[in-house]
Amino acid sequence: MRIKGGDPSALRRRNLATMLRTMYEGEPQTVTGLAQATGLSRPTCEEGVVELVAQAWAVESAPPEPTEVRQPGRPAKRYEFNAAAGRVLGVDVGAHKILAIAADLRGAVTSVRRTDVDPALPAKERLAAINGTVAACLAADPSRDDSRLLAAVIASPGVIDAQGRVVLANALPEWTGLNVAEELIRILGPGTVDGTVSAENDMRMAALAEQWQGVAANVPDLLYIHAGHRMGAAILIDGKPYRGSRGAAGEIGTLSLLDWENSYRRLLSYVPDGDGATGDATLRVFTDLRDGNAQARELVDRFARDLATGVAVMSMTLDPTLVVVGGGISRAGDAIVEPVRRHLADLCLFPPEVQASSLGDESVALGAVRAGLQQVEERLFGAGAALRSTPAGASTPDLGHS
């Protein structure tokens, strides 16, 4: 979907973008209110609203609830951004699951599909699981016939370059070397996405989700620590995921000096004295910790100390506003956060605030949705967006280019 504009001038396209962004960021507006908010003339706004409604980027909103004192005459029409004008897709490719989430252009989730998979699944079979999950998610989306897919983002473990190729991924068999962005294009089919298809590291997407809807809402500088079967980190600076020169920023979990992986394995090996029970060892160790078990307390404190050491190194380098602990360990909540805070107080000049993730195992897919929304926002409202044209054969929407 494109804002075409009958007048092809850059100024007209820029005015359309300004009006649309004002609707996107605020409450429903009358033409008069839109003119006041944008600084554009009323005639310009009147013409622009007609165009935006005709192209389905804006819709007339329901009249406000009547007040006790009713003004004479008919209430002025109000207009708002049409969130159903398009949709975005976020896909989380994990060792144990494939999760796909579709959302409208305000981020409201319209469809979710999940498939549990074996961590040892070969790449070909994992790609088939992605295909089935994505197809089911899009088919279940009630807006599938009325709105275009404007962005799709796939997130997976590993170092992923700017072209979507997995440079290194130890967590998924046969995954290194795959271009997962191209695989998603193939899965979706040619012409399905009227915009961009991209691939991102899963931990960076989890961090973005926390900044969007989680415990780090509106926090610009964030350190995200993933603690579970995989150990690693992600960095947000000024609200943007930091990739580094080769896409490897945050790959601190494999640093042997920290001993993170061995420390987590010790939690997994927890069995109380005289107890042959099996099951979720991490859940059991934290349950027993709350019951006063000394062995559980020692293991958790050891893990928290190891975790805090790596967090301290990154925090003293980056000085983040907040540290979010995500991954499977985040289910422990304060039982893991409190000992990490305690050890950080001994390690850091200015210990950062630490919180456990609130988004659970949907964080990566939600972050991929948010990344897709950011791409749509940049094309519609970003600096110079109204001036760009679409090269022949490209599918990226622009403002005003026929």
Image: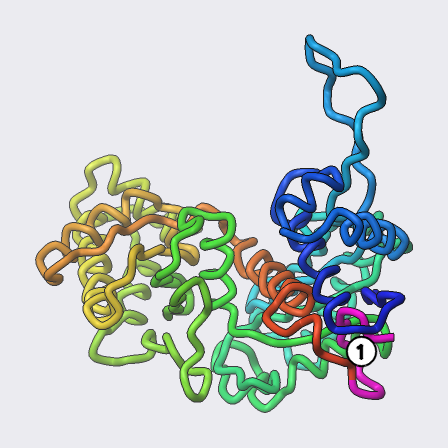
Any part of residue 129 in sight: no
Q: Is residue 6 above or below residue 63?
A: below
Any part of residue 194 in sight: yes
Instruction: Name the image quarter holding the C terminus.
Output: bottom right
Find out whether residue 111 is within the magenta segment.
no
Q: Which residues are magenta?
A: 391-402
**x, y percent for residue 371:** 59, 65
Badge 1 local density, few (<14 within 10 Å), some, or many (20+)? Answer: some
Q: Residue at x 85, y 67 (%)?
A: 4
Q: Residue at x 51, y 65 (%)?
A: 205
Between residues 66 and 323, which one lies in front from this camera angle? 66
**x, y percent for residue 50:** 87, 50
Q: Quadrant of residue 162?
A: bottom right
Q: Residue at x 56, y 53 (%)?
A: 362
Q: Residue at x 80, y 83 (%)?
A: 394
Q: Which residue is mark 1?
A: 395
**x, y percent for residue 314:** 25, 70
The answer to whether residue 160 is left or right of residue 73 is left
**x, y percent for residue 56:** 85, 53
Label 1: state its secondary structure.
loop
Instruction: Name the image quarter holding the N terminus.
Output: bottom right
Q: Is residue 88 above or below residue 217?
A: below
Q: Disc 1 residue type?
A: Ser
